[in-house]
Image (tube, rainbow, N blue to C red):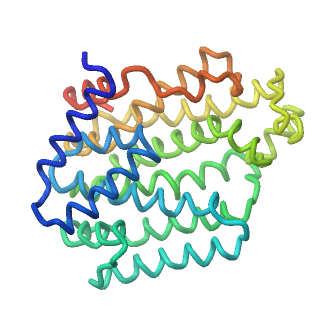
Amino acid sequence: MFSIQRNSQAILRIFRRSQSSSSSQRSSMTYCLDLVKKGDYENFLASLLINGDARSSSIAVRAFNIEVASIRDSISQTQLGLMRLQFWKDLIDDAFVGRPSAQPVGMEIWRALQRHQLSKRYFRRIIEAREDNMKDKSFNDIQSAEDYAEKSVSSILYLTLEALDVKNVNADHAASHIGKAQGLVSMIRGIPINAKHGVVNLPLELLANHKVSQSSVLRGTSDQGLKDLIFDLASQAHHHLTHAKSLAHSVPEEAKVALLPAVSVHQHLERIRLIDFDVYNPKLQNRPHWLAAKLWWHKMRNKY
């Protein structure tokens, strides 16, 4: 087995050699590649294993997601964030009527639309999810957290399937469940980081059921109540992942590479279990071991 770094770098070199010789295209795609590699490394590795033009489109979609997701952490006033999200709404509107943007991610989105029939509603859902998040609204229950993950994560997988020209209800169903599982796992892993910024976005219903106060979460107290709450979230994520995998026999072979993010979700859930649902254990923030190799193994066997 190659190391994670060696395996991913090899894939990246192949990808860059496959790009057009156009300097403007290389420049905008390099920007997107670097952005996704830095901001979403695990999904970056999964995207590199997609073949052909669909790979470029997948990278562009994930770069777009990082751009809109990062706005919240870079502004001091909600209104400023909403104005910046409006920029991305306008950019998407322009791309869909054939007007490319000079912004590198916008340019690559426009190019993706020249190659594939991508749905505008999924881009809008990603932006809408970030608008909701900008307002610091707490999730009332797991269902509302899943709804957010459906808009912010599953939409990316739907666009990736469209980039692969896959139109299949079972593939969409699996993508929905994987997106929800990934969203819940991200919520769990984000608890320590959010706490440092004075934010607790855990479902209010679960906080009440397990008698966990927001102040204790902010203090970094990992008592039994919080562990039980994390167990509930992880169990729900595992349920979604299991459901997605149960659909594998009815998902088209060409669609399965789009669903590779399920591999890292599974590894994170296993790590959460091994650290006894203690979200303040530093091991939780580590990248999964041998992820690049495992992603490659799953692709070669057409699994997710």
Q: Nearer the viewer, residue 126 or 194?
A: 194
Q: Nearer the viewer, residue 121 or 104?
A: 104
On the image, the x and y values in percent for residue 61 come to 36, 59
Question: Residue at position x 71%, y 70% from top?
Answer: 78
In-image side of 15 versus 217 (left or right): left
Question: What percent of the width, then of the height, locates residue 178?
Answer: 45, 41
Above or below for 91 versus 129:
below
Q: Quadrant of residue 163?
A: bottom left
| Relative depth, front residue between 238 and 86 | 86
Does residue 165 appear left or right of residue 233 in this picture?
left
Residue at image position (41%, 78%) is 91
The C terminus, quarter of image: top left
- The part of the image, by quadrant, that contains residue 40 is top left
Q: Identify the residue at horizontal 70%, vertical 30% (top origin).
A: 230
- Where in the figure is residue 286, as x and y percent of width and height? 53, 26
Report x, y in % for residue 235: 62, 29
Quadrant in the picture for the N terminus: top left
In the image: residue 164, left or right of residue 240: left
Above or below, 82 against 169 in this view is below
Residue at figure coordinates x 28%, y 56% from the top left:
30
Q: How many marks?
A: 0
Tell me: 89 left or right of 73: left
